[in-house]
Image (cartoon, rainbow, N blue to C red):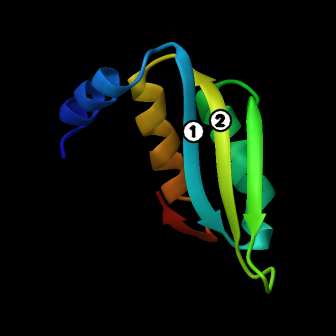
Amino acid sequence: MERDQAIELLEEQHTFPGPFQFRFIVVPEAREPAILALSEVIGSSPDEVIESWSRTKKYCALRITFTVANAEKVLDGFACIGTIEGVRLQM
């Protein structure tokens, strides 16, 4: 999907500025770096961080909610997450 199409789709499904939840799975060492990097790209601290650890504590599913200015920031956030070592899956 091209960036313009993704922006259009996000704008159809979300109100900006407004809350947006990023969801992804990380290894424990990547938890803090992922939150910090995403905060830097979005330009604010998270409104909420919910984490669910695997039984063995090998992985952590993160749900991080930010108040996001626009759809472009959402795409920038997903691009940032994709560059962080230890991120296993974006949802």
Rendered location of residue 68, percent (x, y): 56, 22
- Between 29 and 65, the residue placed more toward the observer is 65
Residue assigned mark 2: 65
Label 2 to label 1: alpha-carbon separation: 4 Å
Q: Is residue 53 left or right of residue 63?
A: right
Contact? badges 2 and 1 (CB < 8 Å): yes
Closer to us: 12 or 40: 12
Identify the residue under disc 1: 21
Identify the amino acid type marked 1. Answer: Gln
Q: Quadrant of residue 64?
A: top right
Which sits in the foreground, 76 or 63?
A: 63
Can you name the residue that lies furthest to the bottom here? 56
Q: Secondary structure at mark 2?
A: strand
Q: Amino acid at mark 2?
A: Thr
Mark earlier in primary sequence (2, 1): 1
Which x, y percent locates residue 76?
Answer: 46, 37
Q: Secondary structure at mark 1?
A: strand
Mark 1, other Cα within 10 Å: few <14 / some 14–19 / many ≥20: some
